[in-house]
Image (cartoon, rainbow, N blue to C red):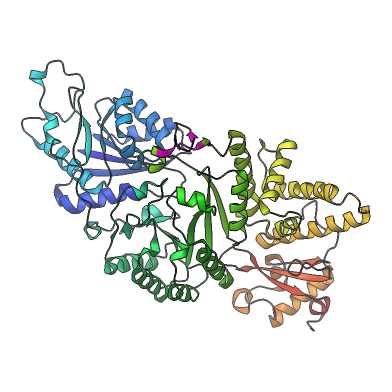
Amino acid sequence: MKILLLAINSKYIHSNPAVYALKAYAMDKCGDNCVDIEIAEYTINHRVDEIVRGTYARKADVLMISTYIWNVEYVKAVINDLNKICPEVPIWLGGPEATYSADKLMAEYRCIKGIMIGEGEQVFCALSEAYKAMEDSESCTNHIVDEKPAGKEHVCDKDSFFKNIKGIIMRTADGEIVQNICPDPLDMDELPFAYENLEPFKNRIIYYESSRGCPFGCSYCLSSVEKTLRFRSLDKVFAELKHFMDNKVEQVKFVDRTFNAKHDRTMAILRFLKENDNGITNFHFEIAADLLNDEEMELMSTLRPGLIQLEIGVQSTNPKTLHAINRTANMEKLRRNVLKIYEKRNIHQHLDLIAGLPYEDIASFRLSFKDVYELKPDQLQLGFLKVLSGTQMDNESKDYGIIYSKRAPYEVLRTDWLSYEDVLCLKDIEEMVEIYYNSGQFRYSIKLLEEYFENPFDLYKALADFYNKSGLSDKAHARMDRYTILLQFYDRLLDDTHAGDSDEVKITRSHIFKQALLFDLYLRDNLKSRPIFASEIKADKELVRAFFMREEAEYRYLSRELYGEYNSKQLAKMTHIESYDYNPYTNAQEDIYILFDYKVRDALNHEARVVILKESELSDGSN
């Protein structure tokens, strides 16, 4: 008997913690008597026929699929095709999308044998035991349920093996839909550790769970449906986190809905991470920033840059909107804490906004965007309301005139405050924010552009309008193209805002902007060839050659530890020196040289270390 647990992830670097947790729990409880459990992971970038072919090749006796809003359409297509190929294989679904759409899925897809509701470990374990018992039963050697029996008197009552399993909705042999009550929530300490073998997770993100449930009741979130908040014992958490660090896992993402819900626990975990820091592993937490207290803030300020990163759901700064969605955040404290964390520059902060919430029109969202942008997040996620089955928002959507797609991910189309045209406008702005802000590749160029706009929202809207009017929106662009487009946008902006200025003034401004673009480029990459917009100002080759010869001997500006084995020619190739008549840090015009050191990078944004040099420092090393 083989059960196949199928996961279809959104990206290759993601892993599916659910299927590994189900397998670990069943093997722990059943021991040697456990059925053969195999895991198969694909992504939504695979073609459906690839997933079908790979699943069929595994010759499973039972198929169970982890179902979410990002993969449910793929799941539907896969089970349709698989059922045609091997109708004898029972198909079970689990996961939040199956749980809260169970009745609809069971009615629409008769190929589904059943659905595991809610928390899956106990349910899956009971199902695997039932299929094992069915296989072993002398009175029922055939484990396949016939949906259309030729004669009921000749059909073994295989459904009896499932009748006492809590937490399932099942289709019986005669087509009846039966729903059993759900089991009590699990004690988190009963869950075995699913990551003893880290080989399947090489070069992928580890998702780790130290608690379940959420203390808040946000109306759009499925986590608010579960009213219990449960924690895994700290001794278990510490041992498991140590396992990740000992194995130098690159990133561990806590899936806890609010990591800092309990102060003493938050402090204990942060202290443990600090004391056992391996210099490599990064830990990602979702937090409520307004709950952070001074003790937590002080501890976080002492952590290695890059040890942790924070995701903070702001969603909106409109008080009426926040009240409507049951958000009780102290916005002033949130602002203060986020800015204080930013000052230390040791923690990456990812702030979220949601478009399409009640009482939020374009004008209101514009203000929310400005409020969050001014907090200087490393990433600003502009998301769109998804109306999920089972949430309060689903029940209240008609009250707010929220119209949303009936296809996953059930995204908002319009509301009483946002037209569909407004939604499309925000979609275009979202793309510009992703390209020109969240990528981190245009930091200094964007700073210059911000000076032309009262609200940064207007900058990204103007960029989106430029893309649309120039026919650029529907084309694929190489990274270097994005720089050229931004220069074209800036030149157009100059024409519009400085129409009365002389050509000489415009040329000077454009020249400065080109240098900012070039600075942004070299911060990330040691370019093999200069871009077409690069300044005509080039570093004197003889000066640069003399500089690196002196560095080989003295190492005044580069680390001997990192570069000591290389000669001057190699140093020149591994780093870069560029000549500027503009200082991007001070925004002032001055003649300088900039040394880009690519072996030393910022832990948060991966920018190269920068050394500002005067010509005298380049020529003879004197200050």
Residue 233 occupies quadrant: bottom left
Residue 293 occupies quadrant: bottom left
Q: Nearer the viewer, residue 435 or 567?
A: 435
Q: Is residue 441 above or below residue 343?
A: above
- Specify whether 17 is left or right of 116: right
Residue 13 seen in the current view: no
Residue 357 seen in the current view: yes
Is 408 contained in the magenta span?
yes
Q: Is residue 358 above or below residue 279?
A: above
Is 531 contained in the magenta span?
no
Give the residue at the far left of this rendering: 139
Dominant SS of magenta comes to loop
Q: Is residue 567 above or below residue 496?
A: below
Q: Give x and y (percent) for residue 584.
A: 75, 66
- At x 35% / y 26%, what residue is drawn? 80
- At x 46% / y 41%, what residue is drawn? 386
Q: Nearer the viewer, residue 547 or 173?
A: 173
Q: Nearer the viewer, residue 78 or 76?
A: 76
Q: Give x and y (percent) for residue 110.
A: 29, 24
First to last magenta residue range: 396-412
Q: Is residue 454 above or below residue 95?
A: below
Q: Give x and y (percent) for residue 483.
A: 73, 50
Q: Give x and y (percent) for residue 7.
A: 36, 42
- Specify whether 114 is left or right of 454: left
Q: Quadrant of the N terminus?
A: top left
User: How many numbered discs sit on the rendered protein?
Assistant: 0
